[in-house]
Image: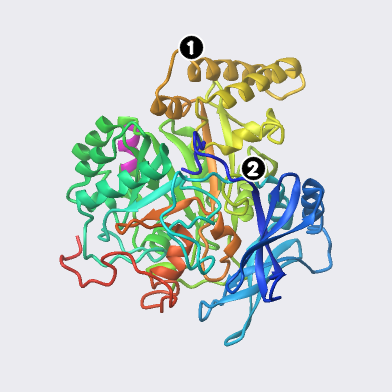
């Protein structure tokens, strides 16, 4: 579940767009500037290690500059050309290296030169139009009420969050255990089978999140496999606070499908399920999860249906393994009332398993590739034009679409009847549309527009009826609590997310700067997910990958196992 409505937290005074090369105006040292829109202008924000902060206006008309920047991508130009520059990592030694973002053959590639390891190239997007257009949707980030670290050396060395990070914590992912009941070949973490998080430590993390964020639409409990934690229900009770709308348990479903008592306790607490569900055949399960999980997955889905457990389905998609099953996963999602959102995650080749998984960085699945497969495998029931970048994260991090549930059970993508460029606020929401004033205004405007043109819109009368039903359900004419306002719309519309965690091939420092998926640590730091995975775990290329010299490991990392594998 991604990027919730940001509530009472203040927006940043600028909109962060990208990184760009510049020089310090005082000492002329080359630097990487933040390109922002502020007060109608385009500005370079510069940090120099010797001279400190400075800035330079690069265009008096910021909107025109952004339009020209997007146009310069020329996604349809058959001649390979550089769109922009950023900082990535050498795929071999993990050093930060200057990177050209190249448009070629209708795709986007990173081209890098490491002074130690030489040149390398990686595919970043299978659709250059999708990649370039995304920058038109960048929006101002939101600040937490407090930061835990101060920017001193520059991104990514000051993570914690530092005061130059461009987005607050939309989704905190708390790793409550490093024990697991599977050994997944695609695993992006580093399970040591050494510790379960103590309830007091978990309580401090939750209290710290509330202090920094005020309200959170979701928190996710992960691992390892969180159902292996002996005090799981106690942790769920600790997190059950009025400031937290949803608690999501990210699970492989193995225990969920066979432990009805646990499932009933989750139901009683209103816990949401984040179910890993990558496909439907033994070959897929073995390639991504290590063994055939067909029966366990079906048992978990049966439990979800019987108890009506609100669920987000999470599908890791890998080239040549399960990218032919995108349409089937969408069919399951649309047909199951309890599944309120579907999160496609193109495979990230980082972590204890993923870092050593065989792959080709020039032939991989990306966000735009999953969208393409969705169109092809649903016979146009979903179209590429139905998906939009999520503005509150970096626009290359997440794309999504909402599906309105019609009274006859069918689902219609919102872009078929909503002008998202007019109602951009709808794209600042999460797994469901929250019952906020701005969402009500946008849906009401949309209802009037559909009413006026229902004869011109396919299924116009059915869409109009569903909009009326949704408005009545989401805005019942009484005061709603934060939890109610966040959750009341989840059975009116479904959401499909596409979120690509970065690895050493496609790491982009500007994406990290606006990351909103964060790992809270026991020592108080809040770590952007992709930076933590790549630099701090020590598994970016598999076990025993050297950490960055400035990296700080998570508590307990590297401890010898204290218990056998379950």
Residue 564 figure quarter: bottom left
Where's the C terminus, which quadrant? bottom left
Residue at image position (39%, 38%) is 311
- In magenta, the rendered stretch is 300-306
Is residue 247 shown above or below 434? below
Query: How crowded is the residue under tag 1: few (<14 C-alpha within 10 Å), some, or many (20+)?
Result: few
Q: Position of residue 284 (x, y in %)?
A: 44, 58
Q: Is residue 65 something that shows in the picture?
A: yes
Residue 477 shown in magenta? no
Give the label on residue 477, or none: 1
Q: Is residue 332 something that shows in the picture?
A: no
Overall secondary structure of the magenta section = helix
Which type of secondary structure does the marked residue at label 2 adopt?
Answer: loop
Colour mapping used in the image = rainbow
Q: Position of residue 77 (x, y in %)?
A: 84, 61
Instruction: Determine the residue located farthest toward the bottom in the rendered image.
Output: 116
Q: Is residue 84 left or right of residue 472?
A: right
Residue at image position (73%, 24%) is 457
Which of the two labelled residues, at mark 2 and mark 1, occupies the earlier sequence position? 2
Which type of secondary structure does the marked residue at label 1 adopt?
Answer: loop
Residue denoted by label 2: 387
Residue 537 figure quarter: bottom left
């Amino acid at each position: 579940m991604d990027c919730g409505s940001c509530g009472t937290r203040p927006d940043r005074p600028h909109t962060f767009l990208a990184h760009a090369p510049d020089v310090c105006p005082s000492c002329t040292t080359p630097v990487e500037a933040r390109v922002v829109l502020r007060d109608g202008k385009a500005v370079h924000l510069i940090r120099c290690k010797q001279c400190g902060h400075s800035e330079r206006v690069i265009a008096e008309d910021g909107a025109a500059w952004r339009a020209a920047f997007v146009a310069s991508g020329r996604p349809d130009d058959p001649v390979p050309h550089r769109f922009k520059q950023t900082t990535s990592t050498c795929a071999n030694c993990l050093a930060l290296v200057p990177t050209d973002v190249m448009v070629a053959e209708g795709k986007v590639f990173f081209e890098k030169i490491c002074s130690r390891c030489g040149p390398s190239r990686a595919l970043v997007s299978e659709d250059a139009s999708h990649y370039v257009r995304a920058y038109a949707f960048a929006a101002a980030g939101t600040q937490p009420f407090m930061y835990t670290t101060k920017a001193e050396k520059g991104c990514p060395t000051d993570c914690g969050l530092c005061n130059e990070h461009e987005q607050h914590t939309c989704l905190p992912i708390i790793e409550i255990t490093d024990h697991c009941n599977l050994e997944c070949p695609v695993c992006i973490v580093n399970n040591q089978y050494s510790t379960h998080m103590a309830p007091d430590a978990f309580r401090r993390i939750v209290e710290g999140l509330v202090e920094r964020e005020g309200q959170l639409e979701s928190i996710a409990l992960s691992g390892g496999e969180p159902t292996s934690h002996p005090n799981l229900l106690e942790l769920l009770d600790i997190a059950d606070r009025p400031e937290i709308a949803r608690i999501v348990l990210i699970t492989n479903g193995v225990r969920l499908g066979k432990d009805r008592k646990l499932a009933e306790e989750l139901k009683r607490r209103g816990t949401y399920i984040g179910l890993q569900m990558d496909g439907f055949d033994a070959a897929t399960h073995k390639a991504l999860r290590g063994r055939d999980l067909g029966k366990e997955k079906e048992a978990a889905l049966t439990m979800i249906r019987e108890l009506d457990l609100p669920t987000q389905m999470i599908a890791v998609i890998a080239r040549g393994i399960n990218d032919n099953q995108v349409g089937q996963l969408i069919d399951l999602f649309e047909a199951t009332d309890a599944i309120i959102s579907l999160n496609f995650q193109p495979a990230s080749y980082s972590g204890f398993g993923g870092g050593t998984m065989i792959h080709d960085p020039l032939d991989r699945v990306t966000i735009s590739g999953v969208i393409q497969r969705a169109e092809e495998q649903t016979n146009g029931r979903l179209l590429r034009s139905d998906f939009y970048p999520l503005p509150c994260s970096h626009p290359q991090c997440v794309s999504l679409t909402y599906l309105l549930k019609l009274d006859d059970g069918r689902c219609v993508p919102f872009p078929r009847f909503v002008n998202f460029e007019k109602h951009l606020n709808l794209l600042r929401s999460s797994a469901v549309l929250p019952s906020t004033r701005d969402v009500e205004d946008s849906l009401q405007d949309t209802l009037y527009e559909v009413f006026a043109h229902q004869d011109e819109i396919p299924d116009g009368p059915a869409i109009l009826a569903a909009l009326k039903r949704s408005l009545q359900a989401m805005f019942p004419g009484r005061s709603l609590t934060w939890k109610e306002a966040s959750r009341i719309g989840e059975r009116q519309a479904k959401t499909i997310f596409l979120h690509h965690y970065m690895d050493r091939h496609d790491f982009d420092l500007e994406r990290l700067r606006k990351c909103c998926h964060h790992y809270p640590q026991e020592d108080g730091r809040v770590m952007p997910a992709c930076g933590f995975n790549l630099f701090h775990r020590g598994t970016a290329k598999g076990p025993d990958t050297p950490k960055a010299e400035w990296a700080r490991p998570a508590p307990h990392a590297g401890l010898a196992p204290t218990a056998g594998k379950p």
